[in-house]
Image: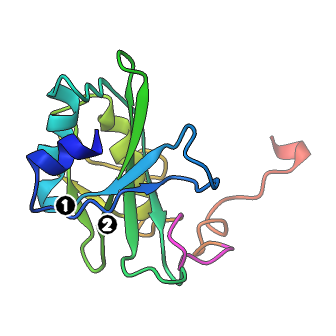
Amino acid sequence: MIEHLQARFPDIEFAPAPLLDRGDESGVQLCVRVPPANLLEVLRFLRDDSRCRFEQLCDLTCIDYLNFPKASDRYGVTYSLLSISLGHRLWIKCFVNDPDPAVPSATSIWTGADWMEREVFDMFGVVFTDHPDLRRILTWDGFEAHPLRKDYPLRGRGEREDYDVVVRGSA
């Protein structure tokens, strides 16, 4: 399937690599890099091309690579794709940086991306452009931080102090 991607998009350096290097080629699951500008076109190709047929977006998440050895980008938005009919998987990584990390929304390709994109937005602050309803899903409106960023303090930013202490007699 990588050869189909490279034939269709010769200008993109996908840098295919095993998701986990186990030292052999049996059952290798691949990960490729896709620039944000080409993301939707590549995802649509992977879904629609009969040689790929990635019908399902299994997961969409993010990794904060702050202070990670050899990392040149801050955030890696990761798409886990599954072809049910052909029985293979592929991971797409799309890297973005501060001050305004943004990738296009995949909801026009897989509607199930909706809530996963909202979760990444809420926890990491990555904006999904053209998302139909991009708002916080795990924290509250007005919360200004993104708790899964590596620079978020371990004890929070005062949100625990704003609540009344509940004890057994007052509950």
Question: On screen, 116 above or below 93?
Answer: above
For the C terminus, the image quarter is: top right
Query: Would residue 164 be visible to someone looking at this image?
Result: yes
Say if mark 1 contacts mark 2, CB within 8 Å: yes
Name of the residue lying farthest toward the right: 168
Upstream in the sequence, badge 1 or badge 2? Answer: 1
Question: Is residue 81 found left or right of 155 in the rendered image?
Answer: left
The amino acid type found where label 1 is placed reads Pro
Question: Is residue 103 found left or right of 28 in the rendered image?
Answer: left
Residue shown at 44%/79% (left/top)?
A: 71
Image position, residue 93 (x, y; %)? 35, 56
Residue shown at 79%/51% (left/top)?
A: 166
Question: On screen, 10 above or below 3?
Answer: below
Residue shown at 16%/28% (left/top)?
A: 49
Residue 152 colored magenta? yes
Q: Which residue is mark 2?
A: 95
Residue 29 colored magenta? no
Question: Is residue 45 found left or right of 88 in the rendered image?
Answer: left
Residue shown at 55%/46% (left/top)?
A: 25
For the N terminus, the image quarter is: top left
Q: Which picture quadrant has residue 23? A: bottom right
Q: Which residue is mark 1?
A: 36
Report the span colored magenta. Answer: 148-155
